[in-house]
């Protein structure tokens, strides 16, 4: 009995990886095995870094809020605690935006947190 291969399906399967690997340097974009390995590694990094992106932005916001608090003679932890006690619910992204773009409004929040 002659050997049977499912060439159309195999070609489609490989073509998916080769299209995804367009633009890769050297053999990574032209050799199927290298292209598949590089693509799968890239997708693993992309998945992990989508999670890390959230952490990194929160860290950036906290750093900006802390810097603005220090300019107003207050620590970050006392500021956040003061906001909680004053029942002001504003997220760190918005606080960082205020600290970066509207220092007068942020200074008023610091005064509220001190009180």
Image (cartoon, grey):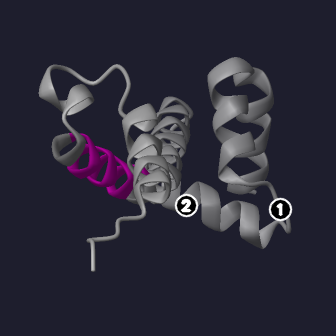
The label nearer to you, 1 versus 2, is: 1
Q: Which mark is residue 89?
A: 1
Q: Is residue 9 left or right of residue 22?
A: right
Q: Main secondary structure of the magenta part?
A: helix
Q: CA distance from mark 1 to mark 2?
A: 15 Å
Q: Position of residue 6 (x, y in %)?
A: 42, 64
Residue occupying the point 51% across, 44% down: 57
Instruction: Give the SS element for disc 1.
Output: loop
Mark 1 residue crowding within 10 angstroms, few (<14) / some (14–19) / many (20+): few
Instruction: Give the SS element for disc 2.
Output: helix
Residue nearest the viewer, comparing 48 with 106: 48
Q: Position of residue 104 (x, y in %)?
A: 76, 22
Residue nearest the viewer, comparing 82 with 94: 94
Residue nearest the viewer, comparing 29 with 64: 29
- Residue on which disc 2 sits: 78
Residue occupying the point 63% across, 37% down: 96
Q: Is residue 82 left or right of residue 73?
A: right
Above or below residue 51? Residue 57 is above
Q: Is residue 113 left or right of residue 16?
A: right
Residue 43 magenta:
yes
Residue occupying the point 50% across, 47% down: 62
* Residue occupying the far front of the picture: 1
- Magenta range: 35-46
Mark 2 residue crowding within 10 angstroms, few (<14) / some (14–19) / many (20+): some
Q: Position of residue 11 (x, y in %)?
A: 42, 48
């Amino acid at each position: 009995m002659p050997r049977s291969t499912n060439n159309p399906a195999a070609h489609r399967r490989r073509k998916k990886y080769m299209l995804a690997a367009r633009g890769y340097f050297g053999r990574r974009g032209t050799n199927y095995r290298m292209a598949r390995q590089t693509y799968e590694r890239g997708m693993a990094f992309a998945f992990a870094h989508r999670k890390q992106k959230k952490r990194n932005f929160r860290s950036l916001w906290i750093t900006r809020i802390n810097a603005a608090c220090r300019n107003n003679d207050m620590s970050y932890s006392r500021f956040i605690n003061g906001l909680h006690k004053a029942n002001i619910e504003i997220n760190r992204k918005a606080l960082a935006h205020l600290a970066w773009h509207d220092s007068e409004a942020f200074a008023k929040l610091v005064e509220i947190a001190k009180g």
